Image (tube, rainbow, N blue to C red):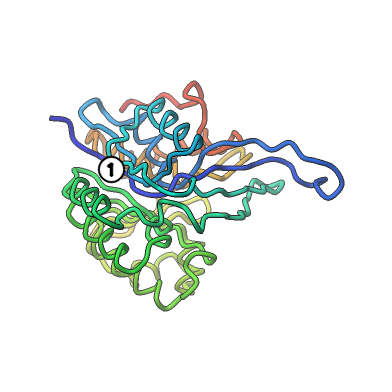
Amino acid sequence: MDKKAVFLGECMIELSGDISSLDKVSSNMQVNFGGDTYNSAVYFSRLANKEVSTFFSTALGKDTFSNKMIDRFKKEKIKCDYIRTDGKQPPGLYSIAINKSGERSFSYWRNGSPAKFIFKGLKGKKLAEQIKKSNIFYYSGISAAILNAKQKKELIEIGSSANSSGFDFNYRSQLHSNKLENQELFKEINKNVDIHFISFDDARDLFGVSKPVEIFDLLGNKNLLLIRYKNSIFLKNGSNELKVINVPHGKVVDMTAAGDSFNGSFLALMHNDKFSIEENILKAHSVTREVIKYKGAIIDKKHMPMINT
């Protein structure tokens, strides 16, 4: 039987384009789909070996955009067995503005998104049971942020039940408005995951740390922590010694899925079980280096680097 890798979160309708002259004339915007855990699921699916089936778990509606999303997931060989389609509203929407250095700013319209109610009701309870005890389970700070307290607890328990769980810190001040509450939430999640992907900038904004090493002191030494800091990844696996891996970025056009592509690629390579953690970091980063050369979160498969998976 294939191993089951479940990525849970919200996939949204994405608007992107140059709006610098929108105050004067209409602007041509591109419509796409995007979301942190969905992006990671795509890169995981592309690199995972044939013994692993990739699933995306979310809640959508019955509208055209929801149907198109599911078609897109299937095109990337992502299975849709754990997607609710009984939502009363269409998926959430966000827009991206990108500056000259490739940095992003976002605007969101997601209050009625079905993904906010994924574990609600009898169908939500059934879904939670179906995705428990997965071989691999992955979610993010955004996945948790959009849920109410009861659903957050359910999500953490589902992650904890997996054979191997991964979590992307992804702190967003617009979503995680209560800092003290979310400091405790992220600490609790860290206790219940095996691999924790952290951007130093996010940890600094939430916890007020000034150096990457302070994050290890905050979160303890039970799991694998990978901290992205400038052109380096700080690595600590349990009580083992701290290591720093150099990961230069090169040409940057769009950083939208830099972290997402790395996380999905790293998880796939880790569970392909061929290389050391350090080698997997470098191979996963080779994917990120390609992703950030192009606009958008998901690059064409022809641009994927050749990796001996």
Q: Residue at x 39, y 73 (%)?
A: 183
Q: Residue at x 71, y 46 (%)?
A: 100
Residue 159 in view of the camera: yes
In this orientation, which residue lies closer to the viewer: 126 or 215?
A: 126
Q: Viewed as shown, does residue 199 lie left or right of 126?
A: right
Q: Is residue 98 above or below residue 219?
A: above
- 227 lies left or right of 51: right
Q: Residue at x 32, y 59 (%)?
A: 242
- State the image quarter where residue 45 is shown: top left
What's the residue type where badge 1 is placed? Answer: Val
Question: Which element carries disc 1, helix, strand or loop?
Answer: strand
Which residue is labeled 1 in the image? 6
Q: Position of residue 301 (x, y in %)?
A: 47, 24
Query: Residue at 32% of width from left, 69% of height from top?
Result: 187
* Extreme-left residue of the structure: 1
Q: Is residue 300 above or below residue 80?
A: above
Residue 40 at what x, y percent from top left? 40, 41
Residue 298 image point, x, y percent: 50, 34
Relative to residue 153, is residue 255 depicted above or below? above
Neighbours of disc 1 within 10 Å: few (<14), some (14-19), many (20+): many
Q: Is residue 243 visible?
A: no
Q: Which quarter of the image is occupied by the N terminus?
A: top left
Quadrant into which the C terminus falls: top left
**299, above or below 37, in the image:** above
At which x and y percent is residue 52? Answer: 23, 32
